[in-house]
Image (cartoon, coloured by chain):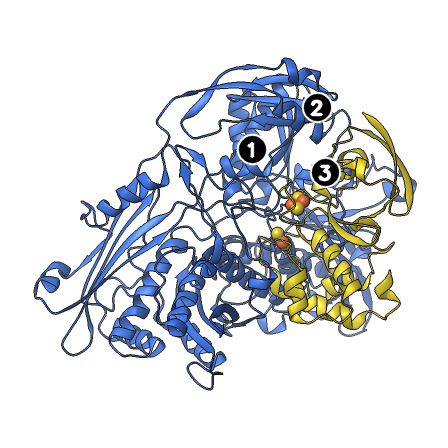
Chain colours: A blue, B yellow
Amino acid sequence: MIGETVSRRNFLKITSIAGGGMLIGFNFLSDNLSAASVADAVFSPNAYITINSSGLVTLMAPNPEIGQGVKTALPMILAEELNVKWDTVEVDMAPLDPKFGSQVAGGSGAIRGRFMPIRKAGATARVMLISAAAQQWGVAETDCYAEDGFVINKASGKKLGYGELAAKAATLPVPADVALKDPKDFKIIGTRVHNIDNKKIITGQPLYGMDTRRPGMLYAMVARPPAFGKAIKSFDDTETRKVAGVKNVVMAHGVVAVLATSTWAAKKGRDALVTVWEDKSPGESTADHDAQYTSLIITKSDRPGRVDGDVDAVFAKGGKVIEAVYELPNLAHSAMEPLNFFADVKENSAELYGPTQIPARMRQEVAKALNIPEANITLGMPRQGGGFGRKLQADNGVEAALISQAAKAPVQMMWTREDDMQGDYYRAGAMYKMKAAISADNQIEAWHLNGASLGGGSAMADSFPAASVPNFRVDTHSLHSNIQTGPWRAPTSNIVTFADESFMDELAHEMKKDPIAFRLELLDKAANTPVGKVGYDINKYRSVVELVAKMSNWGKGLPKNVYQGFAARFSFSTYAAHVAEVTNTNGVLRVTKIYSAINCGRVVNLSGAENQVQGAILDGLSHALFSKITFDKGAVNEKNFNTYKFMRQKDAPIEVLVQFVPTEDAPTGLGEPALPPIAPAVANAIFAATGKRYRKLPFELGKA
Amino acid sequence: MAKYTLSVNNKAMSVEADEDTPLLWVLRDHLNLVGTKYGCGIAQCGACTVHINGAAVRSCQYPVAAVGAGKVLTIEGLSPTGTHPVQLAWEEMDVPQCGYCQGGQIMAAVALLKTHPNPTDDDIDKLMTNICRCGTHYRIRKAIHLAAGKMTPKAAKV
Ligand code: FES
Ligand code: FES
């Protein structure tokens, strides 16, 4: 069966240890039951680690894997402290279970939050295996050490494998406090480790929710409202039921679901439905939103995000004042794997399996919707074909569960790309009015950001250059709308950074200062004469600015037709600075090279970390160049990838070079922080290349 | 409904499906070959790329009735042990992030290397048109160059 909640072998191991902190589990129900497997002692001091008597080390990856690499990086941390060789371990995806702590993919928080607890889990097992060996040899623990899956007796040189020690270690009490490794002895953390699922990915093995296949399972396709503001009034399924393969049509969750024996039959059945929709609330259009933004950004907010000094007094003096308006579109999440979910709902229990960034909340919401106790619901997580924040919502699982309940059948609910585009919780578009005053001695005397966005916040009040400017004000406004919006990779930062960092570049040019030298000058001011709260670490900020300037040989020795732009951002505890290079070939612009400097504390997986930074940069660039979602009376205009455009190789930079600031600091998040500064870095490079300021996303360069 | 006998990964496989069923869904739902992915259904993203008689096609827009005697190759059938030079290059460059698009990317790259055993960046620009939402373009480009280096002229004809 594809997509079991957890492999049977491991499920048994886990249940066998669920009762106490630690005990020996026997695989009594193992598929190949034999004397040997019955005697298979399992050492499992905590939920994350299982070592059997043959020495197989199985590590559990606790957090949802949406492409951010935690299924590789978190077990690496376990393996490091456990002192085993990485290529000898097995990694399994954990099911939802409180013993794995907070199982969330969001806020770039997995490595940041779990680094120390996971190290402790690994170290605990190592210490216990050393104790077991010491007892066996009758020597002191300090006379032994662990390395590469063995405990070694310092005096005699004798070795015992972890598998040989499993039975004994399983009888020892779990120590409360253990010494962690000295980071200078790290052998796995900080190295290049490849994605744990690579082999399965490159051979097309079933891994994703979309690949779930179960006996008796039906595929479900759903007719959803064609626009925000509309709801189903009535439907006629006469033609649908004539489609070969269609088994059932049910109403659930306010939608009509067609269940069939194949995806194609379900889709044909759905397309044959005759639906009547009624207006529940007015359908909104992008033009309406833009008009409202335009009036809001010239209005002060009652509750400004930050006020230092008095910007209005400075602007009123009548010195040099610069103004600019920046616009960003709504965006879709459009993970490559469209939404789907498997649910098998019985009388008073349910099995769920599918893509989610918030498994615990998913189960809660499903329990509520089904009126079945949470304890009777299992939830397993497949590898996910992207997340980007869309799967922080629970709608896909709730919908699948309600359909399964109504149809009394196991259901794989499938969204088409068009369903996914119309049913998103979009990254809200925004508009900013930026205004600054330049003093007679060529300094920024006042900075005013006034932003409006569809739902949610449009600015981070304390982000740079706050604290470096004597008069500073942030106003934000949000529009109420019946269009769903929600977090999208690097929320808020992914909109406001375009305004902040483009405007910074405009000011630098206006003041005839080098854009990087100008930032460093402001950082010095924030360090020496801070105004109000300093919401960022000045030294870390400076570390990435200086490193990327060096990497890119900023401003020096460029070929005639190559131009550079700079931007930086602090978000999710990580600092990112990029230099984008734009090449002008006979009037055709292409972003050809990106340099990126990152300060994210200690890097756990160098290959994975670089991949995240490169990916965030290319993802951000792709959207900045091409993507936008617009609405016409509540209906999305861009319904698929022919109109919602993405970057292809011909538009991608030839090189994306990443360096991490060397540091001993604890690791911080990396899935998001490299995205926000790429759009302004490119806008600033385009300005350098053409003298034209692009203040509106997407750039749509070809259309100029 | 009609009966078809398809050649998929060098095996004869029979299916019963509506003639307008895209090959993508026949592979996924009828033959349980789920390595070929659905991303858009309109031949835009390339997640569903397979080979028919050696050429890359987007199977979401390829009705089963049109396959006829064509030899279909999917990511599962690319090599028995997952060691096609392009697969090895993908591993070596650690290309995948979420991985969802990568089966299609690999099938597109294999097809590209058949016609362009030593592709330039320009060739890659023109012929690699699949979408990757995670932004693995840079590593894909490097992996294609790496694979080209690995491939003997014989391997290029797989
Ligand atoms: S699913 Fe076929 S090209 Fe996108
Ligand atoms: S790796 Fe995620 S879409 Fe390409």
- The CA distance from mark 2 to mark 3 is 20 Å
Label 1 marks which chain's residue? Answer: A
- The CA distance from mark 1 to mark 2 is 18 Å
To which residue does mark 2 refer?
A260
Residue type for callout 1: Asn
The picture places residue A630, in percent across and down from the top left corner, at: 42, 42
To which residue does mark 1 refer?
A396
Pick whichever, A654 or A657, lies toward us.
A654
Tags 2 and 3 touching, CB below 8 Å: no
Foreground label between 1 and 3: 1
Tags 1 and 3 touching, CB below 8 Å: no
Which of the two discs, 1 and 2, labels the residue nearer the N terminus?
A: 2
The picture places residue A11, in percent across and down from the top left corner, at: 73, 38
Residue A3, numbered label: 3
Q: Please determine if labels 2 and 3 lie on a single subunit.
A: yes
Mark 2 neighbour class, 10 Å CA radius: few under 14, some 14 to 19, many 20 or more: many
Residue that appears at 48% across and 68% down? A589
